[in-house]
Amino acid sequence: TMSSELDIQRTFEFVKDLTLKAGEVFKCGFEGEKVVTVKDEWDLVTDYDKKIEDFLINTLREKFPEHLFIGEEGTAGSSDQIELTDEPTWIIDPIDGTINYVNGLPITCISIGLTVCKEPVIGIIYNPITSELYSAIKGQGAFLNGKPLKSSKTTELKKALIEIEMFSIRFPSKDRDLRAGRLDAVTHAARGVRFMGSAALALAFIARGALDCIYMEMLKPWDIAAGVLLIREAGGTVVDAKEKEFNIMRPNIIGGVTCELVMEIKKLIIDTDLKIMRKRLKRT
Ligand code: IPD
Ligand code: CA
Ligand code: CA
Ligand code: CA
């Protein structure tokens, strides 16, 4: 198969060096002038998103001509790839947390994942502003700037610090009551709730043990491809928020430092949804 042909260790070293180089471009845009375009009122894009994605995909494609690419901005021919296949596939978010990036809030990063046979095998999350590079190779653990990471051991929601990302929370939706209900339920059950605005970095913080759990709705594969591997390699768990099977292409996820914590939130979300659905029925 393709996976045995691919030297994971050397591929990792290559992409790590490439990410550090891309980080220089990232920093330039963070500190300097940039062109900001409004995709949606809640989704900005800058010329640096495209510049970084182009640089990453063009360089990787040159090195690995038969690999496939999925990138948020769809530059460098990455958008043709919608279905995940068994082929080695790079899943790239050139800037995660673009709104933070534009505001000069240093909670933003580059996220790069590689899947083989649909499984993440390499994950890199790099915040060039704080010079923190999180990395994981399947079966080899998770690291921050080369030092091994272990997620924390929190098992109870009431003692947990939770991070929430709901994609385009302002997006007009008939499920506004469901979202509000889930938010309310988690906020009341947890020790604390944060909204960081960079899904990828939040996942890295779970691997680091700085957050205990994340709840993320309607995200995209490039937000989570690298982070999921980081959490698993640090000893944590990631599941689909409702379904049995976790789907990397449709991330509605709960990720946490322990299985107990993840399952407690999953149950809370499912129970909350049921309650709200019942309320809806009563109203009609
Ligand atoms: C966004 C961030 C944010 C999440 C959004 C994403 P972007 O990615 O990860 O935290 O809540 O759903 O779209 O657009 O900044 O790369
Ligand atoms: Ca975006
Ligand atoms: Ca993103
Ligand atoms: Ca992005």
Image: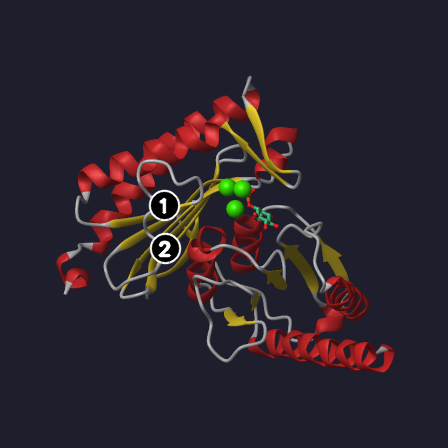
Give the answer, above or below, for where 204 lies relative to 232. Answer: above
Give the answer, above or below, for where 93 lies relative to 250. Answer: above
Q: Can you say which quadrant of the picture contains the C terminus?
A: bottom right
The residue carrying mark 2 is 82
Mark 1 burial class by Cα count in 10 Å: few <14, some 14-19, many 20+: few
Residue most extreme to the right:
283
Q: Which element type, helix, strand or loop, lies under badge 1? A: loop
Question: Is there a contact, CB below 8 Å, between mark 1 and mark 2?
Answer: yes
Estimate the x, y position of residue 71 in percent, counting from the top left: 39, 45
Estimate the x, y position of residue 29 in percent, counting from the top left: 51, 24
Residue toward you, 138 or 164: 164
Is residue 164 visible to us here?
yes
Residue most extreme to the front:
284
Is residue 104 visible to us here?
no
Q: Can you say which quadrant of the picture contains the N terminus?
A: bottom left
Question: Looking at the picture, which amino acid does disc 2 mark?
Answer: Ile
Residue toward you, 228 or 217: 217
At x 85% / y 82%, what residue is drawn?
282
The residue carrying mark 1 is 79
Q: Quadrant of residue 275?
A: bottom right
- How far separated are the C-alphas under marks 1 and 2? 7 Å
